[in-house]
Amino acid sequence: MDLATFQATIRDTYGERDRQRGVDATFGWFVEEVGELSRAIRRQGHDERVHEFSDVLAWLVSLADQCDVDLAEAAERYADGCPRCHAVPCQCGPSRPG
Amino acid sequence: MDLATFQATIRDTYGERDRQRGVDATFGWFVEEVGELSRAIRRQGHDERVHEFSDVLAWLVSLADQCDVDLAEAAERYADGCPRCHAVPCQCGPSRPG
């Protein structure tokens, strides 16, 4: 699954309605899905988790697209390992870049 | 950017520490990054937004990996458009699958 292709598909599928809704409302939908993911992780099984991870990713991509962010380009920051210590595995200690 | 490759890189970079931390703590880190993304969208510029989208994606991938979820496989649910109405663009009306 190519991330740029995925973003284009999400844009073609939901982009017009997402733009009408606006960034704040889209962020609200995204966070609602994060809540559903929490429930799936805590109280449900593998199939429900896969379902909720896909929804969270789809809403994250919708949000990125509305913010004119190319998520594949953003992901390049991690493509060679840790963006802070540049090591694989990361040698930053208990924290992680954020 | 291939999503399966990205998940493998995140696993190689952070997987051992993520497993030691556990799913609940990883979820907490993920949500902290969601908060930082909210701030970047509301009050910061393009570069900060790209940075925060990359962090949210990296933590989502870490969380999926700990839950034995292949995020690329999960994303396939949206590969042909809306998983509910199977149309591009989606014809579901104001809501969206979730």
Image (cartoon, coloured by chain):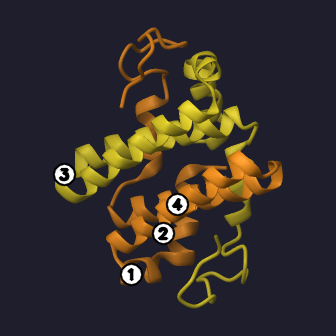
Chain colours: A yellow, B orange
Per the model, the C-alpha gap separating discs 3 and 1 is 21 Å
Residue type, numbered disc 3: Gly
Image location of residue B59, percent across then percent down? 52, 63
Residue reaching furthest front?
A: B43
Looking at the image, is mark 2 or mark 3 nearer the viewer?
A: 2
Q: Up-down: is A85 above or below B55?
A: below
Gap between marks 4 and 2, in whole Å? 17 Å
The span from disc 1 to disc 2 (Cα, nearest Å) is 10 Å
* Mark with earlier residue (4, 1): 4
**Mark 3 → mark 4, Cα distance in angstroms:** 21 Å
Q: Quadrant of residue B77?
A: top left
Q: Quadrant of residue B37?
A: bottom right
Vertical order, A85 against B73 (above or below): below
Name the secondary structure under disc 4. helix
In the picture of the structure, the residue carrying the numbered disc 2 is B29
Q: Chain of mark 3?
A: A
Q: Would you place residue A84 above or below residue B94 in this image?
A: below
Q: Please rate how many residues cluster around mark 4, counting C-alpha atoms within 10 Å: few if below 14, some from 14 to 19, many from 20.
A: many
Mark 1 touches mark 2? (CB < 8 Å):
yes
Q: Does the image show residue A28?
A: yes
Q: Are marks 3 and 1 on the same chain?
A: no
Are the residues tagged 4 and 1 within 8 Å (C-beta)?
no
**In the rendered structure, the residue with mark 1 lies on which chain?**
B
Mark 1 or mark 2: which comes first in sequence? 1
Which residue lies under the disc numbered 3?
Answer: A45
Give the amino acid at mark 4. Answer: Gln
**Residue at which label 4 appears:** B7
Which residue is depicted at the point 41% across and 15% down? B86
